[in-house]
Image (cartoon, rainbow, N blue to C red):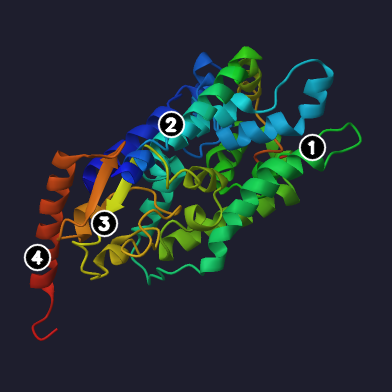
Amino acid sequence: MKKNKKASRQWLIPLTVSLILFLIGINVNEPQRVLEQAWNICLSCIGIG
Amino acid sequence: METVRKLIQTLAALLSNGYWMFPFTRNIYQGPMKILCSPGLNCYSCPASTTYCPIGAIQQLLLSVRFSLETGSFYVGSYVFGSIGLIGSLAGRLPCGWLCPFGLVQELLHKIPSVKFPAVPKALRYVKYGMLLFFVILFPLFLTNEWAMGSPWFCKYVCPAGTLEAGIPMLLLQPDLRATVGLLFYNKLFWMTIFMGWSVVTSRPFCRTTCPLGAFYGLFNRISLIQLRLDKEKCTDCGVCAQVCPMGIQFNKDFDSPECIRCLRCLNEACAFGAISLKCGGLDLQALNRAGLRKAQQVQAAAQLDQPVGR
């Protein structure tokens, strides 16, 4: 029972780590960089050029 | 449930490719929605794409990481890894089964009547982890040119979704680009043809062998909030769940496999004994599981009626 309870909460660990990473990314303004990249056509990415 | 899943897949594909002005602007969407992460593999150079592809974004950030650090910016991919980590922690590989546009394309291709080869050699399953580690992370990071810039290896040399959703449409929209078509494009066209042709005879071959995003989400399958569970006391080892699984998993033997895309076909079409259940944070989703059991019992009863006498 205790093991099951522990297993059912395991998702909280990666969720917390991911949330921290996500917030760090926002703090260093990475979303703006991602947005700038996504606004441009990456020709080599699509196999052209 | 399968109809609901198909509807959600279609809706997700339309939402993540919801910019329908591109035939007039002849360019990709450049609005603020592109700050949002696409839960499935969806090329952000696709003219209709409204979200960013996490696999493309990680490579772009890593290939220019030296330049970023030298200029005092810490763009190391934490926002993107955090975004897909959040999705993976909550749902595991569920987005592959319910939200990925390229998954939908493969499923539709598999509906074309033909000889079917359900099995994929087990060793090929590990290729996707190699793709994630080498083509998405290490090669863009370390194989650099004289200006210390890497290349987006997975997008550039492999990604069939990029060729289908972005490469071909951009060549049609911008005729000037056709002069630049070369070996690189033909290589990508080759891989796209291989995977699309393979999808006709085998279910979801790209997801099973090559997709780095599926490999990443799969790492969370054993610990994610949403889980498919097997009650071993109710399981009769009949193996029907393995027959309906689009990923070729023997669910009764490997119920928390990193391959499972949580399409719920085993729950809704196979197990007539109530051995499979969907759980959220350890809690049984009873209404959904009961409906699934009823549907599976109907499907199995109909399948038995269809069998010739004496079998």
Mark 1, residue position:
B150
Q: Is residue B135 visible?
A: yes
Residue type beneath disc 3: Cys
Could you say where residue B64 lies in the image, as x and y percent from the top left? 77, 29
Residue type beneath disc 2: Leu
Above or below residue B249? Residue B262 is above
**On the same chain: label 1 and label 2?**
no
Q: Residues within 10 Å of mark 4 (few under 14, many from 20)?
A: few
| Residue in the image at 46% along x and 24% along y | B19
Outermost front residue: A2
Query: Disc number at residue B192?
Result: none
Left or right of residue B28, residue B288 in this image: left
Mark 4, residue position:
B301
What whole-number distance in Å separates the C-alpha atoms at marks 3 and 2?
27 Å
What whole-number distance in Å separates the C-alpha atoms at marks 1 and 2?
35 Å
Mark 2, residue position:
A12
Q: Secondary structure at mark 4?
A: helix
Say which quarter of the image contains residue B28: top right
Name the residue nearer the viewer: B228 or B212.
B228
